[in-house]
Image (tube, rainbow, N blue to C red):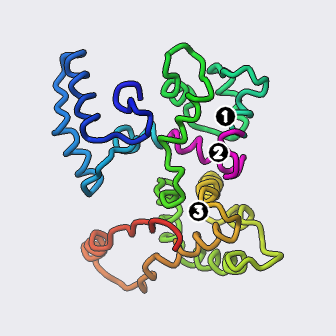
Amino acid sequence: RMLVDRRGAGRVARTDFYSACREIKNAFQVPAKGNVIWSDLQKLRGGQPELLEFQDISPEEADNAELLMDCFFAAQGVEGMANKAWAKLDPGRTGTVRLDEFRAGVSELGFTGDPALIFRGLDREGLGRLKRADFIYLWQVTQTDPSKALRSPVVVEFLNWARQHPSLAKDLAEDLAPISRGQPGGADLAALLRGREGLSEKTGERMLARLARLGGGPSVAAATLLELISGLPPPQPSTESSPAASRAASVASPATPPPSGPR
């Protein structure tokens, strides 16, 4: 954050990235060729991004931050979430939060990731305490844009479950349909996902937290789950085949990527 994203935008342009690489090279006497690294990151993105995101530079740390944001969305809702989250961490209104307070606050929200890693990344001054402005930077580097809400490993986990259990996914889709239409008296989404064979409770909870980023309540979340399930290819009828043929078929049928968002 301090070296690469000096503008505090949560996104880094090519020229700023090159400058950061030159400073790293001069300070640590290591080869840090910005143009080569940028090109490699472009290949990983599968395109020509004008701006690099946190996920491009440090995927594991970004996933950790996204997990915390999922907890905030699930517990606080979309409206005024940043203010509510800060109030949760700083109930005494001292204006700063220490690591132990930060860890305790996010743990109460069900965060199971690494709070110290996030705290150090936000502690711009390195003084062991966060100000509200430091904390708000978390909203800059995570995928709070609803159009990017489905860019998450947990969505991939859900899709893998649906592929492996097509009949269960079909049953879930039938249960989701009334909720997606906003019909009164529908089942609770959490209850629908809980206890599904092969779908862990943690995956279900994270999936609902991720869908909360879309806003719109249960009907939008249910409609999005329906879209994800309906976008999967239909299961193939089982036929007797040789092991070699089975392996060839699995290679020829790559995983379908999740849609970019509800339409």
User: Which portion, as a residue range, is magenta?
Assistant: 64-83
- In-front residue for pair 242/230: 230
- In-front residue for pair 12/223: 12
**Separation of disc 2 and disc 1 at Cα?**
8 Å
Q: Does label 3 or label 2 sit earlier along the sequence?
A: 2
Farthest residue, direction front: 7
- Quickly name the residue at label 1: 106
* Secondary element type, mark 3: loop
What residue lies at 50% left-to-right and 44% top-to-bottom?
Answer: 142
- In-front residue for pair 80/144: 80
In the image, is residue 73 part of the stretch drawn in magenta? yes
Q: Is residue 91 above or below residue 179?
A: above
Farthest residue, direction right: 185
Quadrant of residue 91 within the rendered picture: top right
- Mark 1 closeness class: few <14, some 14–19, many ≥20 residues within 10 Å: many
What residue lies at 73% left-to-right and 27% top-to-bottom?
Answer: 90
Amino acid type at circle 3 is Gly
- Quickly name the residue at label 3: 198
